[in-house]
Image (spheres, rainbow, N blue to C red):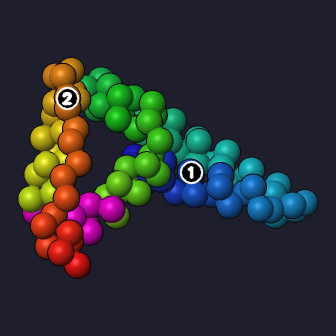
Amino acid sequence: MYHLKTGKEYLEAFRLSCEGYSKHQCNTWISKLNYVENDVFSILTEESREHFRREIKQGDILFFASIGEKFLHLSEQQRTMVEDLVDALIKNDPLTLEKTVDQKSEAA
């Protein structure tokens, strides 16, 4: 479902640059993808449907891909820090963010 939804989002973005027949063809493909998405959704278990609703339908699917690409540039320590931050946000823990200067960068 994730890949289907992602493909549809990219196709919808591509459609914005199209005109005439190309735009019509994109609309046709998007309609077909909607049909497939709904058909697959209908055969999922209720637990899977709820997971899909919560994590995919209500969110911006391209946002997750974008964040994933950015994580590739982080060190293991930085990824752990981000994970801890997200955990705290989910728990509604009070947060205090403080920017520190790396001594190596400061000397440069």
* Residues shaded magenta: 70-76
Q: Which residue sits at x=51%, y=36%?
A: 38
Q: What residue type is labelled 2?
A: Leu
User: Quadrant location of residue 70?
Assistant: bottom left
Q: Mark 1 points at which residue?
A: 9
The verdict on residue 91 being magenta is no
Residue 50: x and y, percent?
Answer: 32, 25
Crowd band around label 1 with a 10 angstrom C-alpha radius: few (<14), some (14–19), many (20+): some
Disc marking residue 95: 2
Horizontal side, residue 26 vs residue 87: left or right: right
Q: Could you say whether the residue bearing mark 1 is in a helix, strand or loop? A: helix
Q: In this view, does 55 lie above or below 7?
A: above
Residue sitting nearer the eye, 83 or 107: 107
Alpha-carbon span between mark 1 and mark 2: 33 Å
Q: Quick one: label 2, few (<14), some, or many (20+) residues within 10 Å?
A: few
Q: Earlier in the sequence, mark 1 or mark 2?
A: 1
